[in-house]
Image (cartoon, grey):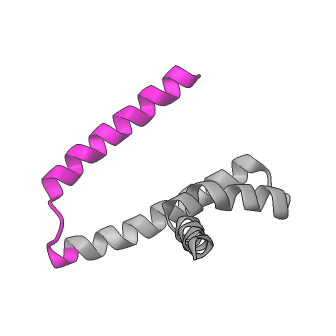
Amino acid sequence: MMHLNYFWIAMSLSHGVVGATKIVPFALALVLGVDLRYAMGATLVSVIATSSGAASAYVREGFSNIRIGMFLEIATASGAIIGAAVLR
């Protein structure tokens, strides 16, 4: 019975954010022979598009706080710029 639990854990991980950001690029690279950099870029574009669609629905329904969202957006962009500069 315990092996079924591990199976469902693996299935849920492969279909969530982990699957989209970790498993899919490596599957594209290893199975289809796509360059890993292109596979990672395609995955990020799909995650951003999906998140943007969901965010617009939440804003339309009034579930989102725009002020907090803008603050987090600025912090995220700043962190990305700093991280890219450090790794360069």
Looking at this view, name the residue that lies furthest to the front.
Answer: 1
Give the residue at x 85% y 58%.
Answer: 33
Residue 51 x, y percent position in the rendering: 40, 65
Looking at this view, is 29 or 19 the one in front? 19
Looking at this view, is 56 or 63 the one in front? 63
Residue 59 x, y percent position in the rendering: 21, 70
The total of numbered circles placed on residues is 0
Q: Quadrant of residue 4?
A: bottom right
Residue 37 x, y percent position in the rendering: 71, 47
The image shows residue 78, relative to residue 8, as above or below, that is: above
Specify start and end residues of the magenta stretch as a single range. Answer: 60-88
Q: Is residue 34 left or right of residue 16?
A: right
Magenta span includes 70: yes
Residue 35 x, y percent position in the rendering: 79, 51
Give the residue at x 58% y 77%.
Answer: 1
Magenta span includes 38: no
Give the residue at x 59% y 22%.
Answer: 88
